[in-house]
Amino acid sequence: MISAIIGAQWGDEGKGKIVDLLSKDAKIVARFQGGANAGHTVYYNNQKIVLHQIPSGILRDNCECILGNGMVVDPIGLVDEIKMVESYGVKCMDNIHIATNAHIVTPIHKEIDLASEKASNNKIGTTGRGIGPTYVDKYDRNGLRASELGDESYIITHLQKKLDKSIKMGLIEASKEQDIKQMFPNFISACQQIHKHVSDVFRLLHESKGNILIEGAQGTLLDIDHGTYPYVTSSNASSAGIGTGLGFPMNKVDSIIGIFKAYTTRVGKGPFPTELFDNYGKTIRDVGKEYGATTGRERRCGWFDGVAAKYTCLANGFTDIALTKLDVLDGFDSIKVCTHYEINGEQTSSFSKLINQLDLVKPIYERIDGWDSPTAGVTNYCELPENAKIYIDYLSRLMNTKISIISTGPGRNEIIKIN
Ligand code: IMP
């Protein structure tokens, strides 16, 4: 069985927990895009662990973890992450595999990312992890790739050339040169440490006889092609990225599971039609602990956007939905779901039509009664309060896709599976 887990909103939908759950039976968990901009929170022996680059399958015994060619891998971050995971007693010696053709994030890319955000009049609110600049080099056919990590003198020459060019082009201030050069030894040492993980993951994937779980990062509305451009990340976070990011054809993927929160959040800049600026938004942020796992930034919170959700279902071809953080809505007297956008006095439920005008739309809501007993920790669908079932059913009908997993709390076992 080959399954994919895809973020269906603006990221932070709780993918880590669902991947952790489904990786129980997986032989391989593979990431296909993004890099250390992701922050996948999982609980291991009741301890919170945030993974940025290592696929969440690392917490399962005998699971091979692949960092695919579509990723941009940060060696310094990866070395730290391996140490962090090992400090919890998890072994990651032989089970992390980096594609030879994955691109490498250098300290120069991180500096360019930060400098360009600082200088820009139209800030994206990036995570500052050097993601965009590394993909720029990839598509400019100038990048450093994982296959080159064992060649120290090549890396030094590459870094020096890249630094000179970046200063010449005004991407980095000349005054930063020495500070950046001081980071090189640490970077090279990290490259040497992760070099042993570089291998032919294409073969590993295609020759696998066991279950494979493909782990998306970020979310479809942050997809470079199908998201709310330019306020997006620099990769294909939708299921479309699987084919290019792993060299694995979509007709081999049996199920594509879209992860939606029971409401909507967004970090960074960009349009967000259902954003709440009132007490409901504040309550969602406080109860849902909606702060970025990577940057600690406050997440913007809002009601479930059914117009955007229908679009991401179509763009990804979801076979199933996992609805997360339902329990955060416990105690709300009423809950709203956006069913249409209004613009110039006209209503539409077409997201693609208005994707470039989202700042101007007014969300039109359907109001649904809240529930009077908690869903937190419930593990059996029948035990959910009636109004919570009505809400779940409503969302499922709106998206025309079955909701087969519901998360009712952060713990590994706080989950409902519906067959
Ligand atoms: P970048 O990916 O760091 O270039 O950031 C581009 C945009 O994507 C910014 O708005 C970030 O906040 C957002 N972003 C990147 N990664 C994540 C994520 O894992 N979750 C949520 N938002 C993200």
Image: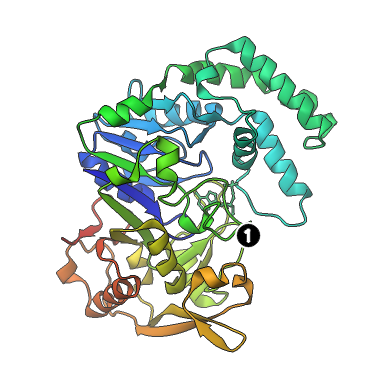
Question: For residue 82, what is the image quadrant?
Answer: top left
Q: Position of residue 141 (x, y in %)?
A: 62, 30
Determine if the C-beta at disc 1 is less than 8 A from ligand 1.
Answer: yes
Give the residue at x 47% y 49%: 237
Looking at the image, is 331 positioned above or below residue 242? below
Q: Position of residue 213 (x, y in %)?
A: 30, 41
Looking at the image, is 383 positioned above or below residue 113? below
Give the residue at x 33% y 34%: 58
Screen quadrant of the N terminus: top left
Give the residue at x 38% y 63%: 313
Question: For residue 393, what is the image quadrant?
Answer: bottom left
Question: For residue 401, what is the image quadrant?
Answer: bottom left
For disc 1, the marked residue is 269
Which element carries disc 1, helix, strand or loop?
A: loop
Q: Position of residue 383 (x, y in %)?
A: 17, 70
- Residue type pointed to by label 1: Lys
On screen, residue 321 versus residue 154, left or right, reads: left
Screen quadrant of the C terminus: bottom left
Front-most of residues 241 and 275 = 241
Looking at the image, is 14 positioned above or below residue 44? below
**Is residue 91 visible to us here?**
no
**Is residue 313 visible to us here?**
yes
On screen, residue 227 versus residue 317, left or right, reads: right
Looking at the image, is 216 positioned above or below residue 82? below
Check disc 1: other Cα within 10 Å, few if <14, some if 14-19, many if 20+: some
